[in-house]
Image (cartoon, rainbow, N blue to C red):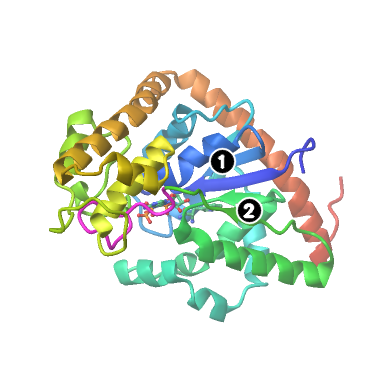
Amino acid sequence: MIDGKKVLFSGMQATGTLTLGNYLGALKNWVTLSEEYECFYSVVDLHSITVRQEPAELRKRARNLLTLYLAAGLDPQKNCIYYQSHVSGHAELSWILNCFTYMGELNRMTQFKDKAAKHADNINAGLFTYPVLMAADILLYQTDMVPVGVDQMQHLEITRDIAQRFNAIYGDVFTIPEAYIGKAGAKIMSLQNPQKKMSKSDENPNASIYLMDEPDVILRKFKRAVTDSEGQILYREEQPGIRNLLDIYCACTEKNPQEAVKEFEGKGYGELKEAVGETVVSLLKPVQDEFARLSKDKSYLDSIIKENAQKANYYATKTLRKVQKKVGFPERIR
Ligand code: ATP
Ligand code: LTN
């Protein structure tokens, strides 16, 4: 608890341009939750280097991501929006937690298996211990709630296991966090292969809608979206392409699938694609405009970055000192 409010933590990697999946699965919910909770939203750049990055590119993408958090509607006076690398406590706690995590647990992580297969030439130890750093992010702020997409559930579970293990030895040190999965949009699929999740690192640009895509590009990508030959707009597993379009529509409009199916009753796939495209265009337009405006305001952004890093450091240090004491590190002489 901070000032009587429950704590919320989440983060995103600056590994590419954000997709509609990231927006509907995570960022949009962050904004909704930001009034009720004391929120920490981090650009998790320490995580990004588990995959090789070009330094200038990483720096630029990280700044764009932080700007996007603001453009999406997060108020930096009320929410702590900062770079993970500006708070050294993440790496320090991560080391300690590494010593409370088993190889066997990490070996079971599906994201590690996927990424290791994708980057077979660089299966580094950081990629393997990625979930421990994520646990450190969350536990450092005594987080109650973590809004993420479904793909991160396994990481949330290991975070809870690590925290419970630590608490069982040392007493109530960490708050045990809960995951928050939004009702709609928790798993947006690729427009080119509806069996695969939409991902910012997909090589095929037609598979994903990027948050900065121009309206005509968005409409074109939806027009090309892979569907099926059933010819009926129904929300069911056998029609993953159509179901994905309906999921996107529902996540944007906050309608439920039954309402959406009714709305498109008797209509063709072309009409559905166009309607979903238009809905996405108008949802993203204000975010894109605000991003363009904020990007030009260097001194404002810099002041946000500085102030919020200080705030995050304050809370992170509080937990870190407690943990250091519990495990038996010597007290600091002031
Ligand atoms: P990468 O392709 O680099 O692995 P990603 O697109 O999967 O990236 P992450 O940075 O891993 O994105 O995730 C950021 C947030 O977006 C997480 O909360 C994640 O659960 C959510 N998310 C990612 N992809 C989707 C998706 N297709 N549908 C819903 N939520 C998603
Ligand atoms: N692994 C997450 C990003 C992430 C995160 C976190 C999310 C890093 N640390 C802490 C929630 C809480 C991902 O979305 N790929």
Q: Label 2 sits on what residue type?
A: Ile
The residue where tag 1 is placed is: 41
Residue at position x 66%, y 69% in the image: 161
Q: Is residue 293 magenta?
A: no
Q: Does the residue labelled 2 lie within 8 Å of ligand 2?
A: yes
Q: Which sits earlier in the primary sequence, circle 2 or circle 1?
A: 1
In which quadrant of the rendered image does the C terminus lie?
Answer: top right
Q: Residues within 10 Å of mark 2 (few under 14, many from 20)?
A: many
Residue beneath the point at 57% across and 61% down = 156
Above or below, 99 against 60 in this view is: below
Q: Residue 207: x, y in percent? A: 22, 51
Above/below status of 152 relative to 86: below
- Left or right, residue 247 beside residue 228: right
Reading the image, the residue beneath label 2 is 138
Question: Which secondary structure, mark 1?
Answer: strand
Q: What is the x, y in percent for residue 3?
A: 79, 35
- The answer to whether 244 appears left or right of 222 in the picture is right
For the residue marked with disc 1, what is the amino acid? Tyr
